[in-house]
Image: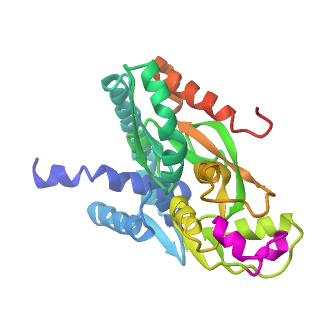
Amino acid sequence: MNDLRRRLLPPVGVLQSFVIAARHESVSLAARETGLTQSAVSRQIAQLEEIVGQALFHRAGRRIVLTEAGAAYAEAIGPAIDAIRRATGEAMAKRRDGEFTIATLPSFGMRWLAPRLPQLTSAHPEMVVNMAARSEPFELAASGFDAAIHYGRPDWENVAHDLLFPEESVPVCAPAFLADHDIAGAADLIGCPLLGQSLRQSAWEDWFALNGVTGPVKLSGRFDHFMMLAQAAVSGGGVAMMPRFLVAQELASGALVIPVDRPLQSRLAYYLVYPHDRLGYPRFRLLRDWIVAEAAGMRPGSA
């Protein structure tokens, strides 16, 4: 391919970032949807502007606004990008009939999905289910994944959402920690070392509010992953606010205890998300139906 033809076909990743940024007129939203940093998206847009030889956006402080040329370009290439996604998804589905890859939150995959998968694959040995850890939002259609586990609201664009279950969190600590601290109620935890998860910034404040306790809440440590948080609590580092299902093993073994058993019910939930066309494939439907059925027992009020 000569230089001119190469310049006329910019990298698909660059085009994708431009189309998403054009749709939202926001670099930050494009970064969130693609899973890239804002600076990476900005560099890709600058690269594309250099290729086409003109500005595609006006910069207005932190905002970006499409130029006339940018709007025309986005309108022209947007359908092509969507067509590439659809064609790739169809090709992958045909190539991997019975083999699927799920992107999952690391702790969810470790403690909920992975232990259950052998039940499915032993009953259906023709199926292969792969898992990949993903913590940040990304664009599912362009990722190559067949499905993903999403925590939050049913707000991913252009995908189907199946409710799995909401999150119920409880404070947990090591038995020796509880023995060394006089904890009779929620208010007694204010003076204890409190540990939290980085993406659940308000969990402790919400839990104290639920229990009628007011006052500033200061954390002694934050952890990116729940299993790191759980290990810190097992080691006696303090009281951790944890989703109950993620520490079921530690609670059953006695490695962790609940000093005040007043669960915090989140308004957010776990969802299985996937492209709408996946349900057209019988084996994917089997996988989806099995995951949803397994999750039904985790919902409030279930036996």
On screen, residue 35 versus residue 237, left or right, reads left
Q: Position of residue 39 (x, y in %)?
A: 40, 71
Q: Is residue 68 magenta?
A: no
Image-quadrant location for residue 77: top left
- Residue at the limit of the structure toward the left, as seen here: 2
Q: Position of residue 280 (x, y in %)?
A: 50, 20
Looking at the picture, tell me which residue is in the foreground, 171 or 129: 171
- Residue at the limit of the structure toward the right, as seen here: 212
Q: Is residue 239 visible?
A: no
Relative vertical location of residue 227 with respect to residue 2 in this rendering, above or below: below
Relative vertical location of residue 176 with respect to residue 93 in this rendering, above or below: below
On screen, residue 150 versus residue 89, left or right, reads right
Residue located 52% across and 59% down the image: 227
Looking at the picture, tell me which residue is in the foreground, 99 or 54: 99
Residue located 55% across and 42% down the image: 112
Q: Position of residue 151 (x, y in %)?
A: 61, 50
Looking at the picture, tell me which residue is in the foreground, 197 or 89: 197
Image-quadrant location for residue 172: bottom right
Q: Look at the image and give the residue range highlighted in magenta.
A: 173-191
On screen, residue 91 versus residue 146, left or right, reads left
On screen, residue 271 versus residue 268, left or right, reads left
Residue located 36% across and 31% down the image: 87
Q: Is residue 188 magenta?
A: yes
Q: Quadrant of the C terminus?
A: top right
Residue located 44% across and 57% down the image: 35
Relative vertical location of residue 123 with respect to residue 74 in this rendering, above or below: above
Q: How is the image coloured?
A: rainbow
Q: Position of residue 123 (x, y in %)?
A: 46, 19
- Count of numbered tags: 0
Q: Is residue 163 visible?
A: yes
